[in-house]
Image (cartoon, grey):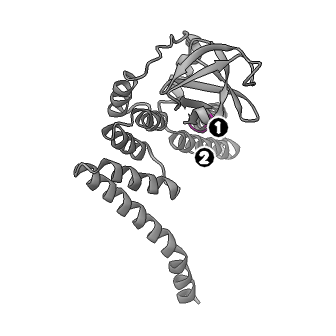
Amino acid sequence: MKRSVLIMSILLLLPLLTEAKDFQDLLEKGNQQYLNGEYEQAVESYRSVLDSGYASAELYYNLGNSFYKSHNITMALVNYERAHILDPRDKDIMHNLEVAREFVVDRIEVLPEFFLRRAFVGFVKTFDADIWAIMSLSTFILALTLLLVYFFAKRIGLRRLTFWTAVVFLFLSISTILFAVQQNNLINHHNKALIITPSVPIKSSPDETSGTDLFLLHEGTRVTVEDELGEWREVVLSDGNRGWLKESDLIRL
């Protein structure tokens, strides 16, 4: 019986192990192609890994480098931005992103963010969502352990100490799981996009004929998608200006 369970477990794990090996082979192939100066082939190898369902900051960074070497600055920007979202503290990613941004025509002023929100977001980005979740689970277990000590302790002083310490750890557990959710939202639900059309007029309304041209944006400019109507998307710039363009004019990050 045990032998049958072991064989079944191995059979179930084999596809996962094979898939992981395929990812690694494609990554190594892409890395070697990049070192050989075969940048367009490296792009295809890295894209194949992404199409298989695997994504990481390092992968997007390598893909961005390959696009940059292929003189496709817009797609280099897209992948540097994606890498930066996943790992905002990586200095190499930030450096290459700043270099690629120098090619963007539009210079959009960034409105100052409310300092408390800026501080909160900066604090949440200190750790990955997985780390926050582990911290939440750890403090929750500590809180439960202390509550058990509280229920079985005889001394009043020990009961008081364990109870209030458990309350503190329970508060930390709730706070850190909220931080994990917030970090996950920052990565997966941010609605950021990049203009990929060489130049596109931003309309006052989602209509080709009746909408007036408000201003012109060029490829590589970062926007936030606020609303949708059919094929049209309302976007907001970092300076607060907003307007409508078509979905085909941008790429989601």
Mark 1, secondary structure of its residue: loop
Q: Are marks 2 and 1 in contact (CB under 8 Å)?
A: no
The C terminus appears in which quarter of the rendering?
top right
Inspect the image, locate mark 1, and give the three-letter code of the amino acid beneath it: Arg
Q: Is residue 227 left or right of residue 252?
A: right
Q: Nearer the viewer, mark 2 or mark 1?
A: 2
Q: Is residue 149 above or below residue 198?
A: below
Secondary structure at badge 2 equals: helix
Q: Residue at x 35, y 63 (%)?
A: 25
Quadrant of the rendered image containing residue 18: bottom left
Residue 91, image x, y percentages: 33, 30
Q: Is residue 115 magenta?
A: no
Q: Which mark is residue 137?
A: none
63 horizontally vs 180: left or right: left
Residue situated in front as seen by the camera: 68 or 246: 246
Q: Please tell me whether residue 166 is drawn above or below residue 18 in the rendered image.
A: above
Disc 2 to disc 1, C-alpha distance: 23 Å
Residue 49's quadrant in the figure? Answer: bottom left
At label 2, which amino acid type do we have? Ile
Q: Which is more N-terminal, label 1 or label 2?
A: 2
The answer to which quarter of the image holds residue 1 is bottom right
Residue 187 is inside the magenta segment: yes
